[in-house]
C-alpha cells in the first residue's frame, strides 16, 4: 500500500544531506589552481559549486554541494581548531535548533537568513564547527 503522506511534507527537524565541504589550505590560490587543472573543478570566489544532484524524493529539485578551500587559519572555522568544516543541509532549521538547545549542544550564533537559505553554526562534542543550512528551493 502506498504511503499517502508526501515525503516533501515531512518537517521532522533533521539533516538530510551534505551542503558543503570546507578545508584549510596553506596556499589558497595554488590549491584552487591544482584542483582546476588536475581534477577539472570550476573554481569561483566561493570554491566550486559544480557538484549538483537531484533529490531522490523530488527529482525536479536540484541540489548542490559546495566545495571550498579556505586560507589556513581563516576565522570562519573559529572557534574550532580543526582543518575542516562540514555544512549539513537540513530541513526545519528552527525545530532542529530547539532540539539542539534541549540537548545542550553549543550553538555559536543566531539563525542568519539569506536569499539562498538559513544558516547557523554549532560545535560537536569533539570541537568540530558545523554549519547547518536550510536551503531555499
Image (cartoon, rainbow, N blue to C red):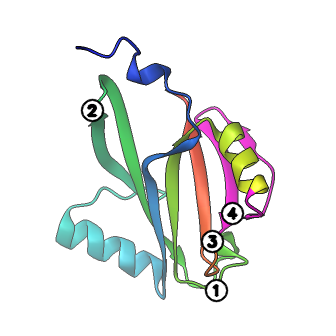
User: In front: 66, or 97?
Assistant: 97
In the image, farthest residue toward the right: 110
Q: Describe residue 96's horizontal placement relative to residue 82 as left or right.
A: right
Disc 2, disc 1: CB below 8 Å?
A: no
Q: Distance between the residues labelled 4 and 3?
A: 7 Å
Disc nearer the start of the sequence (4/1):
1
Q: Which residue is drawn at 56% across and 29% down?
A: 11
Q: How far apart are marks 3 and 2 (CA)?
A: 28 Å
- Give the residue pinned by disc 2: 56
Disc nearer the start of the sequence (3/1):
1
Q: Specify the label residue 81 is tagged with.
A: 1
Label 2 element class:
loop
Disc nearer the start of the sequence (2/4):
2
- Give the residue pinned by disc 4: 122
Disc 4, disc 1: CB below 8 Å?
A: no
Residue range (magenta)? 103-124
Q: How far apart are marks 2 and 1 (CA)?
A: 35 Å
Amino acid at each position: 500500500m502506498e504511503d499517502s503522506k508526501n515525503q516533501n511534507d515531512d518537517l521532522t527537524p533533521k539533516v538530510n544531506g551534505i551542503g558543503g565541504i570546507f578545508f584549510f589550505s596553506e596556499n589558497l590560490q595554488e590549491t584552487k589552481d591544482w584542483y582546476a587543472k588536475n581534477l577539472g573543478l570550476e573554481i569561483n570566489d566561493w570554491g566550486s559549486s559544480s557538484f549538483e544532484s537531484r533529490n531522490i524524493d523530488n527529482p525536479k529539485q536540484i541540489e548542490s554541494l559546495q566545495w571550498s578551500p579556505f586560507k589556513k587559519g581563516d576565522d570562519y572555522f573559529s572557534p574550532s581548531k580543526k582543518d575542516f568544516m562540514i555544512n549539513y543541509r537540513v530541513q526545519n532549521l528552527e525545530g532542529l535548533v530547539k532540539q539542539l538547545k534541549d540537548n545542550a549542544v553549543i550553538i555559536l550564533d543566531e539563525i542568519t537568513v539569506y536569499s539562498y537559505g538559513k544558516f547557523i553554526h554549532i560545535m560537536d562534542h569533539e570541537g568540530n564547527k558545523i554549519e547547518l543550512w536550510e536551503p531555499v528551493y
